[in-house]
Amino acid sequence: MIGSGLPLVSVIMPTYRRTDTLGRAIGSVLSQTYRNLELIIVNDNGGEDCFTPRVHEIVSSFSSSDSRVRLLEPSIHKNGAFARNRGVESSSGSYLAFLDDDDWWEPEKIERQVEAFTSLSDDWGVVSCRVKRFRGDDLISVLPKHPDGHVYKDIMLIVSDFPTGTLLVRRDLFEQVGGFDEELIRHQDLQLLIELTFRKKLYQLNEPLHCCDVSDGQNRLGPDDLIKAKKALFTSVADVYGSLTLFEKHAVASAQRAEVGRMRIKNGQKLQGIVDILGLLSAPEALWKTAEKTMLRMRGNHNARKAGDISC
């Protein structure tokens, strides 16, 4: 185990109307084997919201016995990006981590990531980990290991998946890119990751240390809203997108259109959805990487079924 005197890690946790899972998330942070951390919980419910008293009660049950816990209550409530940025502004750590209020971590997550940073050069700005996906108490998949490095192209091609809760980020890098884009309604996580990995490399631990609950499907966008969200995302990361070759831009556009196509099929627009997906045939790189990702995910689902007794 890592000893004392090591860098402070700031964990930022926005909470919005999930008081049923908030305690589990907080507990997983405070149970980390890496002890030199602070947890900043950002109440995004608003002072008059009926969830706020329960948030106060839950947070107090932890902060009364652990001084590492703080509750931040912004006067403005905008979106998750705004809440996370306010949490970072109130933090002191040289490394930043983020956790949603319905997810949780394995106890060794932060320790493993700080250890990884000690062996990496300044070319590396982010350490991630693999993911266990749950539906309720059931483990449904373990996401595969993705390539390391400047992975922004793979993120834009939708073939690498690094949820925000998996990340440990150098604070100076986060500040360099300007944090989360608060004008984005969706995809702030992808925006941040694209900007980070355009400038520095990402290293992913080959260990599933982040546990993600996918039971809540309320935030799923329809095809039209998804198109709007994608346009806003690529406007936000125009500097990175503009650095791509024409071939790479075509591959990215085809991959993004295929994702919209899959959503159209789910919504009953089968013909248009198939047309969107067939666009991959004109972009060999996107087609190959999409097929590779599908095979890896199928393997992860199979491994999860074989290890059904795994839990966090």
Image: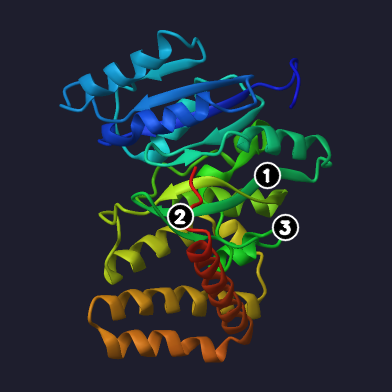
Reply above or below: 239 against 289.
above
Q: Residue at x 43, y 77 (%)?
A: 257
**Amino acid under label 2?**
Arg
Q: Which of the 4 quarters of the picture holds residue 149?
A: bottom right
The percent coordinates of residue 99 (x first, y second) are 47, 37
Q: Residue 133 carries which label?
A: 2
Residue 99 in view here: yes
Q: Which mark is residue 148?
A: 3
Q: In this view, does 194 lie to the left or right of 48?
A: right
Residue assigned mark 1: 127
Which of the two labelled residues, at mark 2 and mark 1, occupies the earlier sequence position? 1
Reply above or below: 180 against 25.
below
Give the Cα distance between marks 3 and 1: 9 Å
Q: Quadrant of the N terminus?
A: top right
**Amino acid under label 1?**
Val
Assess whether mark 1 and mark 3 are in contact (beta carbons under 8 angstroms): no
The percent coordinates of residue 42 (x first, y second) are 38, 26
Which of the two labelled residues, at mark 3 and mark 1, occupies the earlier sequence position? 1
Reply above or below: 161 against 279.
above
Q: Which residue occupies the foreground of this view, 243 or 292?
A: 292
Q: Which residue is drawn at 41% across and 25% down?
A: 41
Q: Which of the 4 quarters of the picture holds residue 248?
A: bottom right
The percent coordinates of residue 89 (x first, y second) are 51, 24
